[in-house]
Structure formats: structure tokens, C-alpha cells
Amino acid sequence: MHETYACDMRGLLSFQILFLLSKKPMHGEELAQELEKRRGDKPKAGTIYPALKDLSERNLIEGKKTGKTIVYSLTKDGRIAFKHSMKYFVRSFGDMLQ
């Protein structure tokens, strides 16, 4: 679908990040690549890193620095938040997927 005809889905970025990190820890570029596979466009650093910072400040994710790379993973609160977010998503949008 041409992007002109799509609605703005950027509001789902934090949810998508939590979803990806529920699968395995990832660094920022890896997250951006996975998001590109799903969305068709790669989020810019100015989009993804503020979202990661926000999630980190809310104690939903944590970053562990290895050299110059920071690998992010869900915290206990992040796993709980993702579980609640997933229930909300399914309740809100699940019937659209059938």
C-alpha cells in the first residue's frame, strides 16, 4: 500500500518496541531493522532513541552497555506493562485481524 493512503501508525512505536524486546534483548539498530521489516520503513534515530529513553525512564526497559553498543531488555515492570498492553491491543484491534 502506498504510504499516502495509510493512517499514521507512529503511536504504536513503544508497544512495538516492548513486543520486540519481549522476544529477545536487542540494540537500537537491531530494533530499527526489525521495525522496518514489519512497518516497511525504518524509523530514524531521532524517533527510536527518544522512545527508548522514555521507556527506560519509565523503568519498562533497561540498557546494558557492551563497548559502544547498548543492548535493551524488558524489566520486570516492562514485562507486566507489555502483558497489559497486549491484552488492550487484542481487545481493541483483535477483531480487525480476523
Image: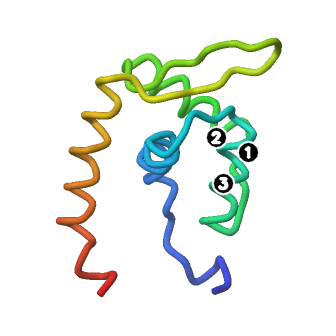
Residue at mark 1:
44
Relative to 86, 28 lies left or right: right
Which quadrant does the N terminus fall into? bottom right
Determine the secondary structure under disc 1. Answer: loop
Q: Which amino acid, by three-letter code, is at mark 2?
A: Thr
Task: Find the distance from the CA under tag 2 to the CA under tag 3.
Answer: 14 Å
Q: Are marks 2 and 1 in contact (CB under 8 Å)?
A: yes
Task: Specify few, some or many for label 3: CA neighbours under 10 Å numbering under 14, 14-19, or 20 or more.
Answer: some
The image quarter containing residue 35 is bottom right
Rendered residue at 38%/26% (across/down): 60
Determine the secondary structure under disc 3. Answer: helix
Q: Which amino acid, by three-letter code, is at mark 3?
A: Glu
Find residue 36 and report its horizontal and vertical position in percent: 69, 59
Please tell me which of labels 2 and 3 falls first in the chain: 3
Find residue 19 and report its horizontal and vertical position in percent: 44, 48
Marking on residue 47 = 2
